[in-house]
Image (cartoon, grey):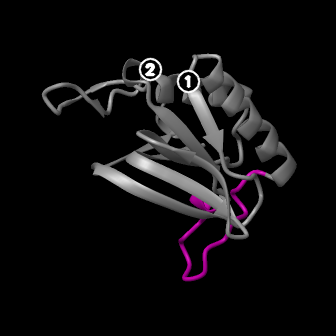
Amino acid sequence: MIAVIQRVKKASVSVENKLISEIKKGYTILVGFCQGDNDKITEKMAEKIANLRIMADNQGKMNLNLSQTNAEILLISQFTLCADTSQRRPSFIKALKEDEAKKLYELLIKKLQEKSLSVKTGKFGEYMQVEIINDGPTTIILDSKDF
């Protein structure tokens, strides 16, 4: 599983030019579910995201997590994060099948909400437009292979 986390001042997602979700400060997270991902990995990713300290404290240092700042999450599924780019045209064979990925996506939402985090979402499997105002810019990549 790969999660690209961007600290944002605000973000939104639209489908067919209709706004479906938006947040103020927090994280926009693009998440890709790859072959081999499972419930246990998803739970670990939720734990990592919840405890990641990249929100600014009073001195402007990255020292606080989401719950300490009443920040929100905008969680967007993005299978292209699992791309094999060894050739000029990316292959997505390493991405988890849609039904399995959707199950893990829903589990990730649930696990983050169980940590009392506000989670808004895109629309799984849809073509989306995501707008963000990056804060910093601060972008962190979490790869489940690293934990």
Whether pointer 1 and pointer 2 mark residues with C-beta atoms closer than 8 Å, the reply is yes
Q: Residue furthest bottom?
A: 88
Residue 119: image x %, image y %? 61, 33
Mark identifier at residue 67: 2
- The residue that disc 1 covers is 117
Q: Residues within 10 Å of mark 2 (few under 14, many from 20)?
A: some
Residue 147: image x %, image y %? 49, 29
- Front residue of this view, candidates 55 and 142: 55
Occupied quadrant, residue 60: top left
Above/below status of 67 relative to 21: above
Give the overall secondary structure of the magenta segment.
Answer: loop
Above/below status of 22 relative to 81: above
Q: Residue at x 64, y 29 (%)?
A: 41
- Front residue of this view, candidates 86 and 132: 132
Residue 17 vs residue 54: left or right?
Answer: right
Amino acid type of the residue tagged 2 in the rendering:
Ser
- Front residue of this view, candidates 89 and 53: 53
- Which segment is the magenta one? 80-96
Amino acid type of the residue tagged 1 in the rendering:
Leu
Could one spot residue 3 in this view of the protein?
Answer: no
| Quadrant including the N terminus | top right
Q: Residues within 10 Å of mark 1 (few under 14, many from 20)?
A: some
Residue 136: image x %, image y %? 25, 49
- Front residue of this view, candidates 10 and 47: 10
Occupied quadrant, residue 45: top right
- CA–CA distance between discs 1 and 2? 7 Å
Q: Residue at x 50, y 61 (%)?
A: 131
Q: Residue at x 54, y 70 (%)?
A: 85
Q: Earlier in the sequence, mark 1 or mark 2?
A: 2
